[in-house]
Amino acid sequence: MSGPDLSQLMEQAREAQSRLAELQRELATRRVEGSAGGGMVNAVVSGDLRVLEVRFEDELFAGGDRAMLQDLTAAAVNSALANAQRMIQEEMQRASAGLPLAGLGQG
């Protein structure tokens, strides 16, 4: 029983590359949010991991605690980035689930 020939494998690789490129374009249009401080700071990042927005609740400025504001901002951005990375990983797994390339190299 022989496996797929080289031309079939090359075609499958091209299809996989095309699907992944399309997925990357689609992910770049998605927005993922993270927050910190019970929603006092919210950050929005794109699916290609660009920070799009950082929003602050007005109450944060009343206290004048710069260090807390900086910490909450970093936490919100990191939360949004982690959520985006999780979304990317899930979508990549979904996109590659049907690819027959997983068994390559096994005799």
Image (spheres, helix red, strand yellow):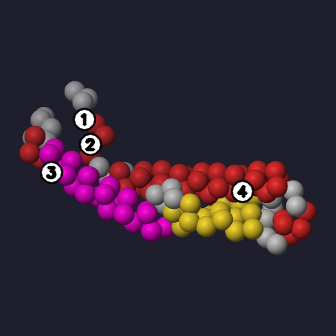
Contact between marks 3 and 4 (CB within 8 A): the answer is no
Classed neighbour count for the residue bearing mark 1: other residues with Cα under 10 Å, few (<14), some (14–19), many (≥20): few
Give the labeled residue for mark 1.
104
Contact between marks 2 and 4 (CB within 8 A): the answer is no
Give the labeled residue for mark 3.
11
Q: Position of residue 85 (x, y in %)?
A: 53, 51
Residue located 48% across and 54% down the image: 88
Q: What is the CA distance from the residue labelled 3 to the residue labelled 4?
A: 46 Å
Precedes in sequence: disc 3 or disc 4:
3
Residue 40: which quarter of the image?
Answer: bottom right
Contact between marks 1 and 2 (CB within 8 A): the answer is yes
Residue placed furthest toward the right: 63
- Helix, strand, or loop for circle 4? helix
Q: Is residue 61 visible?
A: yes
Q: What is the CA distance from the residue labelled 3 to the residue labelled 2?
A: 11 Å
The boundaries of the magenta stretch are 9-30
Q: What is the CA distance from the residue labelled 2 to the residue labelled 4?
A: 42 Å
Q: Which mark is residue 73?
A: 4
Give the labeled residue for mark 2.
101
Give the foreground label among 2 and 4: 4
